[in-house]
Every structure is written in C-alpha cells, then in structure tokens.
Image (cartoon, rainbow, N blue to C red):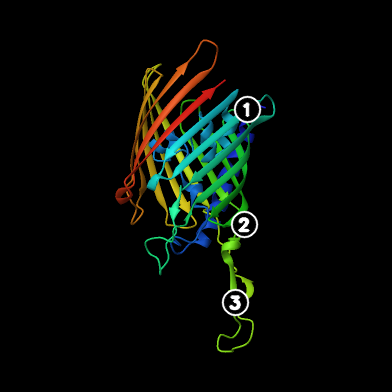
C-alpha cells in the first residue's frame, strides 16, 4: 500500500485540490452575509483539545493526538495502537463541557474511533416579563454528541477520514436531534516537512425544536364568546442549519535537534454562520517531553471577543511502551473573560 508510483501521488494531489475547490465553491455560493446566530448546535464549535486550543485551533493539518480527529478525521489514519483522551473544559458562564475519545488502529484496515461530547449549563432561574426576578422554577440546557469515526492512511503521505455524529440538544422540556458528517484529508509533503489539511465539519440536515414547552391552549376567535377557547395546540418551530465549517490548514515543523523543535501552524476557516477568519499558532517542544504553546484566534474577523491563547503540555514515555500526556490551555474571550481546558491522554 505504501509503495505507490509518482503518477499515483500526482493523481492524489489533483483529487485533494479538486475536493478543496468543490467545498470552497459550495460554501461561497451559500455566503454573502455573515448569518451570525442562524445555526443550532453551537456546542459543536467548542474546541475539545487543550493542545489544539492553545494553538488557536489551527489543527487541520496536524496529527499525533487522537482528538485531532475533531478538526480533521483524516488524522485518525496516522494513529498507531490505542489512543485515549479526556478533556474537561471550564467553559464560559460556569458551563460544564467534557469530551472523550478512544481510537484503535487495526493493521491493514485503518483506525476506528468513538467520541462523546457533553455540555451542561447547570440550573438557570426561569424569568418572565411578569416575574423578572424569577418564577421559582429552574431549568437546564444540555447538549450531547456521539460520533463514530474511521481513518485510513492511503500512502505514506496521504490519509483520509470520516466521522458520523448523532447529536441532541435540550432546553428545559424542548429538544432536537439530528445527524452530521465530518470528513477530511491530510497530505504530508515529506517526513518532518510541510503538512496540508482540509476538512468539512458538521455537515448535515437542519433540525427544529419540539416538546411539551411548545404546547399551548388556542382560541380560534378571541372575540367570540361561548366557544371552546382552550383547544390543545402546539407551536411549530423552524428548522435551522448546523454550524458547518470548512477548514484549510498548513503547518511546518522546524527541527532544531533530536530533542527540540518548533511547530508553526495556520488555518483558514469558512463557517456558514459567520465571516471567514484565520487562526495561527506556534509550539516550542523542549527535550521531547515539555511544550510551550501560543496563538491567536479569529484574525481578520470583525467584532470578535478576545483571541489570545496560551498553553503548555507534558508527555512521559514509559518502558512498557505506553505514553501519558497532560495539556493545559488558557483562552481569552474579552468581555466574556476566559476559559480553561485540561486534557489527559494515554497511548498504548
């Protein structure tokens, strides 16, 4: 599988460029205005990886940690053995966000992954126009997504991947459920050299809310007395799209010596609910085991809140052949203050 001709490699390059042009054209036709606030499932845009977050989410062209599949499923094709990661995110407004993923590489088949995302707002007071201080009731907002992924290394330079997700969101007694698809491709020009990546995330049908919070009593004619003014009825909500993102990324490692290197990475983002932006990050790896990271999100995006991200990471190799990693990220969100992420990973 790894020994391919130059002609085959050239064809693969053409396919990658062609796919990128198709995706870009499709999104450009749908754009024209920012469309902020027109999609549901916003929790799908929260970065689950501390390492990726501290690199400003510029991870479309990266591989090596299993959570890279969130940004580009093609990274699964580069994994070996079994990989497990768990992230706890102290998100904005004390919202609790957790992410877990496990992937297993199967020789001559590829890699399979299972990932789960959970978000919980905690209890919120119910407020109305008549009772702005609260009715005494409380509700929660919860999100959950479960994804099954597959990645395959086609050649020593090219890998592809896809993830199918089931997701649901609940607000008090109303909810929606739907499915989405993420897919991507990775191309490595040469070992320890330029890496290119492209992916589409959260592509799928729209969905609308339903539930008993939409049940009402309806009066066909309020001016008519003596009729039934409490007919059971239900409000019908519109369907909204998922937050689909098209990412194109490039990264380049600068090898200083056997134990130290610098990684430079840049992503261009085209969402269907906002304008385009650029993310850029840098990682300094020291003595193979310690990393310092920094970057800036949402470059060239108007009215963005914050953007600076910083982080660090430690990885330890054990004699039994397994590795443990721990990463931390701090992200600035301007008037919304900051978010902290902690990621623990195990490679077997």
Mark 1 nearby-residue class (10 Å; few <14, some 14–19, many ≥20): many
- Does label 1 or label 2 sit earlier along the sequence? 1
Q: Provide the residue designation for mark 3.
A: 218
Residue at 60%, 37% in the rendered image: 160
In the current view of this chain or complex, which residue is farthest to the right? 108
Q: Position of residue 288 (x, y in %)?
A: 41, 19
Mark-to-mark CA distance, 3 and 2: 31 Å
In terms of secondary structure, where does tag 3 sit? strand
Residue bearing mark 1: 104
**Is residue 340 in sight in this rendering?**
yes
User: Could you classify mark 2 by the number of other residues whose Cα lies within 10 Å: few (under 14), some (14-19), or many (20 or more)?
Assistant: few
Residue at x 36% of width, y 33% of height: 282
Q: Residue at x 52, y 62 (%)?
A: 30
* Secondary structure under the numbered disc 2 in the rendered image: loop
> Which is nearer the eye, 51 or 142?
142
Residue at 62% of width from left, 30% of height from top?
155
Give percent across and percent down for residue 174.
57, 58
Residue to which mark 2 is pinned: 205
Of the numbered discs 1 and 3, the one sitting upstream in the chain is 1
């Amino acid at each position: 599988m790894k020994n391919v001709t130059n002609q085959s490699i050239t064809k693969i390059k053409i396919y990658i460029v062609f796919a990128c042009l198709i995706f870009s054209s499709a999104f450009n036709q749908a754009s024209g205005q920012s469309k902020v606030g027109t999609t549901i499932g916003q929790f799908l845009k929260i970065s689950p990886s501390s390492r990726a977050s501290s690199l400003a989410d510029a991870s479309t062209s990266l591989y090596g940690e299993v959570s890279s599949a969130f940004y580009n499923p093609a990274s699964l094709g580069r994994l070996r053995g079994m990989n497990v990661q768990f992230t706890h995110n102290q998100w904005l407004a004390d919202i609790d966000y957790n992410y877990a993923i496990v992937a297993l590489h199967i020789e001559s088949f590829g890699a399979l992954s299972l990932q789960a995302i959970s978000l919980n707002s905690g209890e919120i007071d119910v407020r109305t126009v008549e009772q702005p201080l609260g009715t005494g009731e409380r509700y929660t907002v919860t999100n959950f997504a479960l994804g099954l992924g597959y990645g395959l290394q086609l050649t020593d330079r090219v890998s592809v991947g896809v993830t199918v997700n089931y997701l649901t969101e609940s607000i008090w007694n109303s909810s929606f459920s739907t499915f989405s698809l993420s897919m991507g491709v990775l191309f490595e020009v040469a070992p320890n050299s330029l890496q290119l990546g492209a992916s589409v995330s959260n592509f799928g049908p729209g969905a609308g809310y339903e539930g008993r919070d939409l049940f009402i009593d309806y009066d066909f004619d309020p001016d008519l007395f003596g009729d039934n003014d409490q007919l059971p009825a239900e409000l019908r909500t519109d369907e909204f799209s998922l937050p689909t993102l098209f990412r194109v990324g490039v990264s380049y490692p600068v090898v200083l010596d056997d134990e130290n290197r610098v990684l430079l990475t840049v992503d261009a983002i085209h969402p269907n609910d906002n304008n385009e932006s650029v993310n850029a990050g840098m990682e300094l790896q020291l003595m193979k085991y310690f990393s310092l990271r920094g970057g800036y999100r949402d470059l060239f995006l108007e009215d963005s809140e914050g953007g600076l991200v910083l982080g660090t990471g430690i990885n330890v190799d054990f004699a039994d052949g397994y590795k443990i990693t721990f990463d931390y990220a701090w992200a600035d969100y301007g008037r919304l203050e900051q978010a902290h992420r902690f990621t623990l990973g195990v490679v077997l």
